[in-house]
Amino acid sequence: MTSPTLPTLLDWYSLSPVNNGVVPLIFAPDTSQIELSDAERTSMTLLATKLLDSQYQIELSLSGMYYAGTNIVPSLGISVPPELEPLRATLGWCAAGVDARSERLQVLGFRMPGQTSISDDLQQVWQANNFDAESRLVHDTAMIYGRSFVEVGVNEDGSPLLTTESPHNMLGAWDIRKRQLSVAYRTYYDVDPMSPTYMKQRSTLYTPESTIQLYHDSKGWKVEDRNDHKQGLVPVRMFSHMPTIKSRFGVSAMANSWRNCQDRACRTLVRSEIASEFFATMKIFLLGVTEENFRDGQGNLVSAWETYTGRLSALEADANGNLPQIHEVRGESPDGFISTIDQQAKIMAGLTGLPPQFLGLFSDGNPASADAIRMSDFRLKTTADRLCNSFGNEWEAVMRMTYAVQGEKIPEGSERLETDWAYTGIPTPSADAVTVTTQIGAGMIPPTADDALAACGWSPVQRQRFEDERKRTQGTQVLAAQLGQLQQPPKQAVDGQQPKALDNLTAKRSTDAATAG
């Protein structure tokens, strides 16, 4: 069996006929002839060499293959015949572990310190760049490959431009003291037919002082554009999954234990498939029969199916009166394979923190009550909350950077900017409403508090609409009350009695008349 060819950065590119069918390779640039400073030249050479290292690309590709379920799981060479070696089984357990986390990571907006509602300015930037959808790509890529990148630039009209990038094409160096990238490098082939550098390799070097764009042609590398912004920051943020003190570049969520467990289950499925063809079917042996027993009335040999369905029940004795002997070997039960797969599913559930029913329905994996469901979901929710803290820190840095790239002053207090995430647990609207109502009744929170609506699961947009509607309703009520007072008729006498104010006026007039007399 030959080793499979792992997909590389340009597998998709091989579909384009270039240079008479010869596909050009992305390569590290020779920076000796490029107009760069010594620090820029060193940074570009080191990062490009690491990014284009074959082992680095293979590790990334292998993670992508496990997520897509296209990884090759070879047999152990014991129970699988060589002729059936190409038979493969595909399980999506690794993808299920990643997707279960990703589905709970939804950014609703950003709140400045002291505010209960999301920032309209930052929400405008977020939605103008379509990051309601693009943010999911950042989260998924970080969990699959260990890291992903977001670049902050400027559009032609001066508005912030946010773009995402894969670790296949981008890498950076980490500043331990500042806890951010000190330099970043990106390279790719330009496949936009409308671009002046179509079918050429492009690269971008990001430093704290400059952003340098380069391209490669037949004469070598050339600097296309250089923006010396002098802002002292690299306009790139790296989203790392489970970084450590030793390495801030993160690791794939699909740990080796996940992959090994999925491989074992895949091999068991292959053995089960082979067993169903060879060992799970009943076998029949006939003793004391000749070829003549399997001919029809015209002397023609009957088919195997006709023999199985009819001839076996109508065999005659031979000339000596001996009946043929029929022996059967019953097929093997698949229970052993099923038990093994169930065992691997339980191991995978323990490794990933997924409720057992996420990996297949079986009797002891279906919680019967809401409390049991929440308890089975506790570990997954905790994991999602930790990811919110990690990824939220990077999103807040990205949004602060949008002010800097526009030349605006970063608002005071923005270092305490908070990401507003959707609830990461199992929604329980009825129970949440009862809890909030009880706290309002106890005087713990005001009835119109924004946090009260958030605890009930309403999004920032919905909460803002509720606030606007509340203000409009209150204004209408005040106006109606004032109009009611203006239209109220004067007080009339009751039972022949004059109003008290009128009695006082009459008495005063009598006193004045007596004094004048």
Image (spheres, rainbow, N blue to C red):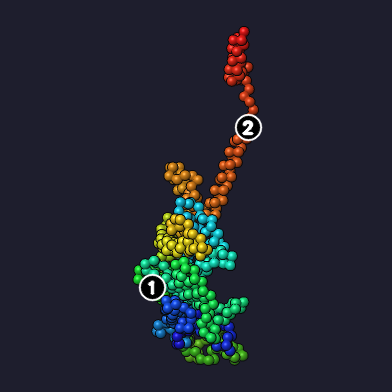
Give residue 508's position: percent from left, percent from top: 59, 15
Q: To which residue does mark 2 refer?
A: 486
Type of amino acid under label 1 = Ser
Residue 44: where, in percent of width, then height?
A: 45, 78
**Which residue is more in the foreground, 353 or 416?**
416
Residue type for callout 2:
Leu
Closer mark to the observer between disc 1 and disc 2: 2
* Position above or below: 481 against 429: above
Residue beneath disc 1: 257
Residue drawn at (57%, 88%) of the image: 19
Q: How far across and down, in percent of the image, does residue 479 sit?
A: 60, 38
Report crowding for label 1: few under 14, some 14 to 19, many 20 or more residues within 10 A (C-alpha).
Answer: few
If you read the primary sequence from the N terminus, does the residue marked by circle 1 or circle 2 appear first?
1
Do the residues under discs 1 and 2 have CB atoms within 8 angstroms?
Answer: no
Please tell me which residue is depicted at 42% across the width and 63% down the height of the picture.
Answer: 390
Q: Is residue 475 left or right of residue 149?
A: right
